[in-house]
Amino acid sequence: MPVDVQLASTAGQLPELSAIQRWADLALEELGEDPEPPDLCIRLVDAAESQTLNSRFRGQEKPTNVLSFPADVHIPGRRTLGDVVICMPVVVGEAARQQKAVDDHLAHMVVHGVLHLFGYDHQKDDEAQRMEGLEQQILRQLGVADPYG
């Protein structure tokens, strides 16, 4: 089953669904996961939805580039990973400020969000180095420049 991609944004040019699928698949492959896992949703949203979620779950009253929600349910016979929510207006704005292609920055957010579903974090320096190194490795395979360089 392919990744469930939901396009709920009107901000800018949205990427091809196949590109989002490829970015998520590569991240999952690098983590040693089946590239076609069940129950992984990537949702591209506008600022209002991102802000609502960020406020409710993180206590921050602003939209953010990416949020990850690991699944908290066990369904016999299925592997439920969770949801990655990406705010397209934030991603488009960040890409412009950082002089990056929108698709390259969006690929980074997909990879970043998927890694969060597997428990990777960047709150501590050693965790950040580990997570960023894996992101760089995956993005390099996609032809995306180092987002931290």
Image (spheres, rainbow, N blue to C red):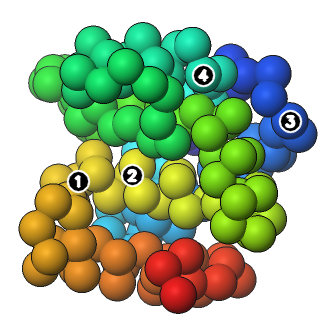
Residue holding disc 3 = 12
Disc 2 from disc 3: Cα separation: 23 Å
Indicate which label's residue lies in the foreground, 4 or 2: 4
In the rendered image, which residue does mark 1 sit on? 118
Mark 4 or mark 1: name the one nearer the start of the chain.
4
Amino acid type indicated by mark 3: Gly
Name the N-terminal-most of marks 1 and 3.
3
Kind of residue indicated by mark 1:
Phe
Identify residue for label 4. 47
Residue 23 in the figure: left or right of residue 30: right
Residue drawn where x is 69% and y is 34% of the image? 89
Q: Earlier in the sequence, mark 2 or mark 3?
A: 3
> Which type of secondary structure does the marked residue at label 1 adopt?
loop
Tell me the number on the disc at residue 114. 2
Q: Are marks 4 and 3 in contact (CB under 8 Å)?
A: no
Q: Which element is circle 4 on? A: helix
Three-letter code for the amino acid on which mark 4 is drawn: Ala
Residue 12 horizontal/vertical position (percent): 86, 35
Where does residue 129 sit, x and y in percent of width and height?
24, 81
Front residue of this view, candidates 10 and 141: 10
Q: Secondary structure at mark 2?
A: helix
Q: Place residue 97 in its image quadrant.
A: bottom right
Q: Position of residue 11 (x, y in %)?
A: 80, 29
Residue type at the position of mark 2: Val
Q: CA distance from mark 4 to mark 2?
A: 20 Å
Q: How far is the residue under mark 4 from the one under mark 1?
A: 25 Å
